[in-house]
Amino acid sequence: MSKLVEGLYYSKSHEWVKPLEDDVVLVGITDFAQSELGDVVFVDLPEVGDTVSAEVEFGAVESVKAASDLIAPISGEILEVNDELVGEPELLNKDPYKNWLLKVKLENPDELSELLNIEEYEAFIK
Amino acid sequence: MINYNRMIFELSNPGRIGYSLPKQRFTDYNVEALDKKYLRNAELLLPEVSELDCLRHFTNISNKNFGVENGFYPLGSCTMKYNPKINEEMAANKAFRSLHPLQPASTVQGALEVYYQLQEYLSTISGLHEFSLNPYAGAHGELVGLMIIKAYHEERKDFKRKKIIIPDSAHGTNPASTVVCGMDVVEIKSNSLGRVDLESLKAVLNDEVSGMMLTNPNTLGIFENDICEITKLIHEAGGLMYYDGANLNALLGKVRPGDMGFDVMHINLHKTFSTPHGGGGPGSGPVGVTEELAKYLPNPRVKKIDDYYFIENSGEALGQISSYFGNYLVALRAYAYIRTLGKENLKLVGPYATLNANYISNALKTAYDLPIPGYCMHEVVFNGLTNKDTDVRTLDIAKRLLDFGMHAPTIYFPLLFPQSIMIEPTETESKETIDDFINVMHKIAIEAKEDPDKLKQAPTKTPIRRTDEVFAAKMMIFSYKDYLEYIQNRG
């Protein structure tokens, strides 16, 4: 059974979005995503200052099984990148909700409403 | 033999030798006169061992290996068929082995005849007009085939045709070859049966389409029923059809890519025509084309006038894509395979390969989740166990198979299902071997329920037990030098 966290927004491509303050959010991958991927060996992330667009790929995760694109759930400018993951990609397997990928300043906060809530995502991955 | 676990470097003892060199016959050189920058400064790290130590070392490590001569090897999409020994006997014949590619054609008429005849056989078998045996392997063949498609459009000054359409179920080499060739990949989704979705295909057709790459049967082992419609649509849009020969074994003797409307294709001789694979290779990926495209084939070409075979270098578009004739001795093995089987038996390859896969599919579908019901071609894809209530995953099933002396099938490919397990028995296995495999697979399904821990621990009977794949993927140590550095830094 995949772990889910209350208060997050979820995408159908298995990323989560956590709103902080002032339209800034954290973006990560869900527990379902990490368990389907298996052991993660490499994470390819964009750079601070780059922009991401909703439903467009922004990086990749490589596991012992396959390489998968990371799809941005929202649009905005990248404020921070979790560099820890580059050296220790296995953190994504250990705790995918604590180990976020990007900190993004939202370009259009309304986009959040288009994402799934916890119940909808739970039903989606069933 | 106790678990042998040494590197040849560890056996090294300075001054020990296992060779005797012939007398030096060349005296007209002067090392002193060489520019200093060409001289090696560091010590040469080569092992110094006796002949017997060397022999024992390689015999011992070869015992850890598993090949098609050890047991069942149903690695999906790889067509791991048995390589008949007569092929090796032919390739080892001194008359072929000691030839030089620059010998005058008049002195190698027999060798050229073999090469020419194989080009002709592949044409007859595939329905395409002309073949080049030069490419070294499947992916090389793909690249050469795409270069031909590109050259065709560019000669007509149609420079905007840069898009290659590829279904999402394709082998990873297809998009990779496309990008290496400087073209753009357009991916289209498969329908629920794993086939090309015609509406999705129509939606991406325009005057920028260069061509489409397709494997048929596709990566799920399913025949593309709409193939004639697909090739028609691509041709109407001005593109060319590329046939990836990865799964040609399923069709051998029954269906020809040329008749389905393909313009360019490659054949993996190491799959369909029984030459050794990959590490045991080298491989060979001949490229075939329609009459219209024949002028784009790479150099050198072997041609024939009356009874005389000669070498031609007339191709201007691609020039040379390999050194000389590609892997000649691999082509020779494929020729031997075709000649020993003969026309009538060759026609049975595809049907027998398909029968074996369907026998497995039918026998295992109660215990293993068959996502696409109905007949398959030469391989069958399951999506893990039918019983989804256990923690046992495809990886554990594959590892457990090793304990029974069978090679694991391809796993986690194709990517369309989360727990893919792709089984290709080939036509060269007996019913008894396939029945053994089926019994073992059922046994594993029962273990998954009753003793899942056994599967999580597997393999326990192999020389190397379950490997730490994350560590292996992150710590890439490819040479003894790197290994010494790693040990030193670790302290």
Image: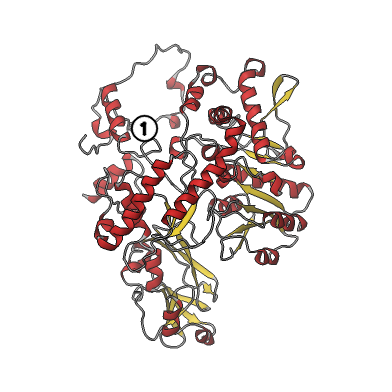
Quadrant housing residue B108: top right
Here the colouring is secondary structure
What percent of the width, then of the height, locates residue B423? 45, 50
Quadrant in which the N terminus of chain A appears? bottom left
Q: Chain of mark 1?
A: B
What percent of the width, then of the height, locates residue B77? 50, 48
Q: Is residue B362 left or right of residue B125?
A: left
**Pointer 1: what residue?**
B41
Residue at the image point whose x is 30% and y is 59% from the top: B446
What percent of the width, then of the height, locates residue B411? 42, 54
Relative to A100, say whether B414 is above or below: above
Residue at the image point whose x is 46% and y is 45% from the top: B425
- Comparing A16 with B345, the one in front is B345
Q: Amino acid at mark 1?
A: Asn
Residue at the image point whose x is 72% and y is 19% from the top: B307
- Comparing B218 with A12, the one in front is B218
Residue B472, visible in the rendered structure: no
Quadrant housing residue B337: top right
- Comparing B424 with B173, the one in front is B424
Relative to B466, say whether B204 is above or below: below
In this rendering, the count of numbered labels is 1
Q: Is residue B84 left or right of residue B240?
A: left
Secondary structure of the residue carrying tag 1 is: loop
What percent of the width, then of the height, locates residue A109? 51, 86
Q: Is residue B252 left or right of residue B358?
A: right
The residue sitting at the right extreme is B156
- Comparing A31 with B196, the one in front is B196
Residue at the image point whose x is 41% and y is 70% from the top: A33
